[in-house]
Amino acid sequence: MTNADFEKLVDTSDEWITSRTGIKERRIADDDTATSDMAVQACQRALDMAGCAKEEIDLLILGTVTPDYRLPSTACVVQEKMGLPNAAAFDVVAACTGFINGLSIANSFIKAGIHKKILAVGVERLSSFTNYEDRNTCVLFGDAAGAAVVSAEEGDSGIVSTFLKSDGRMREFLWSKVGGTLHPHTPDYTYDGTDKIMMTGSDVFKVAVREMANASRHVLDQAGIDASDVTLVIPHQANIRIIEALAKRLKVGMDKVFLNIHKFGNTSSASVPLALDEANREGKFKEGDYVLMVAFGGGLIWGSALVKW
Ligand code: ACO
């Protein structure tokens, strides 16, 4: 969907969306494509790139807020669709930091010697969860999936440090009110958008800039390196202005920050792995380079991961 498509749906303009968010287009899944279908494609491509057989995967961690079902987890659906006979599988509900949470869990399980080859996936079908009558939110979101194989290897490359944090007191800055046990969908529910994504954008904006900078510094400090030592920063693609403010706080030039928000919009937990994959395929970093991933989302929740490629 392009900005021109949204001009026909709500009172907005290409100029407003571009200048306030940096978004030009988003990808929207067709009606027959479930969240699990997108995850399967991303997982298969990750396995191919890693040269890894399905039998080797012993854990699948899937970040999403748009599951196929309430029960079972989408991870179990993906396990069945792909055929991962030796894997455990579970979902992580961490909005836009879902992939970072997955990476962090994968890193811990591997370092503890519990698992050896883990698929970490971030996938969202946000179009099923977006109120296309609300101009404050509908222009922002898109559908996508991204995945990575995390494996136990010798050597000093890999995940150097991770950081996770949340503050549930700010949960109503970005939430969906109706549909859970607290406010169930009753038979007389008349559609008012409260079962879709609702957001107080300006409040989220301020916390996002502050906490993405803090989360970034945390993993850099843990590794004993400076932001200037990082080859590429891969931030959650929520808003170009948030990303520019983050770069300013970290004192890194925008030439060191990966951007693809113009093509995909905000794809929540898929945003970071999608950007990581594009940056990798474009050769934006090489072996031994530091890559910093940082994300922020509904919870409120934030996290970061520093990788030596
Ligand atoms: N087109 C035209 N006008 C709009 C639109 C639109 N699409 N959307 C909002 N406006 C209007 C508002 O109604 C408001 O008008 P008013 O002053 O008459 O009330 C005006 O623009 C300014 O609204 P603000 O919300 O103050 O605009 P802001 O500059 O903050 O930009 C935005 C809004 C883009 C949402 C920004 O706040 C943002 O990106 N916030 C953070 C989003 C984010 O990072 N989310 C986290 C991850 S999402 C997840 O976890 C799933």
Image (tube, rainbow, N blue to C red):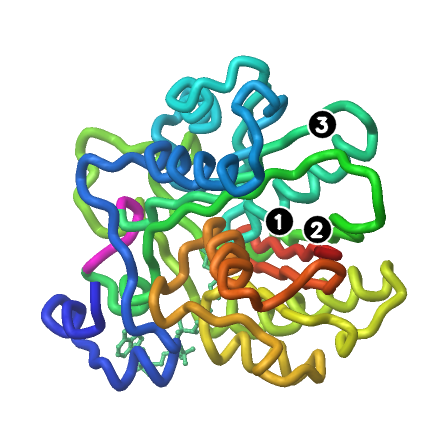
- Which residue, as the protein is rendered here, is positioned at the far top? 85
Quadrant position of ligand 1: bottom left
Q: Where is residue 125 in the image (x, y as percent from the top left)?
A: 33, 45
Label 1 to label 2, Cα distance in Å?
8 Å
Q: In this view, does 264 lie to the left or right of 165?
A: left
Between marks 1 and 3 in the image, the one whose residue lies nearer the viewer: 3
Between 91 and 138, the one lying in front of the other is: 91
Could you tell me the amino acid type at mark 1? Ile
Q: Are marks 1 and 2 in contact (CB under 8 Å)?
A: yes
The label number, if any, that marks residue 100 in the structure image: 1
Q: In this view, does 242 lie above or below 93?
A: below
Q: Give the range drawn in magenta.
A: 128-132
Q: Which of marks 1 and 2 is nearer the N terminus?
A: 1
Q: Is residue 124 above or below residue 7?
A: above
Identify residue for label 3: 116
Label 1 to label 3, Cα distance in Å?
18 Å
The secondary structure type at the circle numbered 3 is loop
Q: Which of marks 1 and 3 is nearer the N terminus?
A: 1
Please name the residue shown 21% across and 81% down the image: 13
Let me know if residue 49 appears in the view.
Answer: yes
Quadrant housing residue 178? top left
Between marks 1 and 2 in the image, the one whose residue lies nearer the viewer: 1
The label number, if any, that marks residue 206 in the structure image: none
The secondary structure type at the circle numbered 1 is helix
- Which residue, as the protein is rendered here, is positioned at the far right? 224
Magenta residue check for 282: no
